[in-house]
Amino acid sequence: MLYADVSWQPVMDAVQQAKQIHIVAHVNPDADTIGSQLALYHALKSMGKCVVMHNQDIAPYICRYLPAVDDITHGDVPSEIAASDLVIAVDAGSMGRLGMEASYFEDKILINIDHHASNTLYGSINVVDARYCATGAMIYDLLQHLNVPLNMGSASAIYAAVLTDTASFRLTCVDADVHRMVADLIDGGADVGLAAQSIYQSHKPARFELLKHALDSLNISHNGRVAWISLAHNLYERTNLCGEDSEGFIDYARSIEGVDIAVFIREEKLQEWKVSFRAKAPCDVGVVAGMLGGGGHQYAAGCTLFGTLDEVQEKIKHALVDMLNS
Ligand code: AMP
Ligand code: MN
Ligand code: MN
């Protein structure tokens, strides 16, 4: 157990009483939200619960090796899923991040399990704790409270969640207890080699065409402290790729000596830019993203901005001013 003082009892009571449980991940899902969803699915199934998984968006290809990923449906909510009396949202900082109408939750209990400090506590039951390095690690603790042993499905899913949300165990939130949890996950059936191959060594060749453009756009400002990369929409069209194919590009910008903040701006639709921030200690990009209408954590955050690339960069520079002067 990572944190013994977390109050899981309301979650366990709601799970006991539920007839059908819908587990939902956030929009534009990453491996933490999908891994958390799958781990909870395996655990609740093994308890004999009726449980379904449905998200707005399809799971990223790096998650395709995880057991039961094909059981997740996406798009409009089918009526048999809408019949659920309990919804459990994992790794979503606000209701908007679920991509569903608020009315969907009106006749249901909504449990919000998340590790974003900026979480808006939108659930009827909220277990929100920013000490956790990943929502997957929260599910690890919940499973122990539920007395459900790890199996290959849940251990692999939690491992993928923690591996990716800690930038491969590189963040300062990775302490000895996180590594003890990982040891337990490996004992429980998580295949470290398969995870590495599926997540980091299965990229499409065209990704590297896109990476060339991204590195070409690399630009460093603020006396070497901020590194920027950007990709316009037409480059994704030309390479027949989408946002998930440029996952990780921002790490090149953060890896530069002296850079405190990396910014990756990609055009999702014409003049609609998905902005990603990454920081090194002691900077906190969660605050910057929050000022721009988004959210996230100290070292990884994001938001969506509209306009030309120049306009978007100006808005970001404005939001960065206070942090870089402090
Ligand atoms: P990304 O750069 O997309 O990998 O996101 C990094 C972190 O920021 C994740 O923890 C996300 O949950 C959070 N994040 C990204 N975009 C948004 C947004 N538009 N609103 C709130 N949080 C976001
Ligand atoms: Mn996430
Ligand atoms: Mn997360």
Image (cartoon, grey):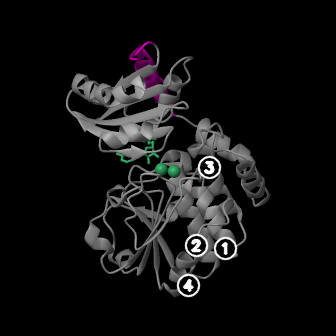
Q: Considering the image in quadrants, where does the N terminus appear? A: bottom right
Q: CA distance from mark 1 to mark 4?
A: 13 Å
Q: Which residue is denoted by mark 1 in the rendering?
A: 145
Q: CA distance from mark 4 to mark 3?
A: 27 Å
Choose the circle earlier in sequence order: 4 or 3.
4
Q: Which amino acid, by three-letter code, is at mark 1?
A: His
Whether label 1 touches label 2, CB < 8 Å: yes
Q: Which residue is denoted by mark 2 in the rendering?
A: 8
Choose the circle earlier in sequence order: 1 or 3.
1
Q: CA distance from mark 1 to mark 2?
A: 7 Å
Residue 132 visible in the picture: yes
Q: Which residues are magenta?
A: 204-223
Which percent across, then down, holds residue 214? 42, 22
91 drawn magenta: no
Q: CA distance from mark 1 to mark 3?
A: 19 Å
Please name whichever residue, 294 or 167, is drawn nearer the observer in this view of the structure: 294
Whether label 1 touches label 3, CB < 8 Å: no
Residue depicted at x 39% and y 46% = 295
Q: Is residue 85 above or below residue 259?
A: below
Residue depicted at x 53% and y 75% = 11
Please name whichever residue, 149 or 320, is drawn nearer the observer in this view of the structure: 320
- In the rendered structure, find residue 162 and report the number of the disc placed on it: 3
Label 3 within 8 A of ligand 3 by Cβ: no
- How packed mark 1 is, by other alpha carbons closer than 10 Å (few <14, some 14-19, many 20 or more), is some
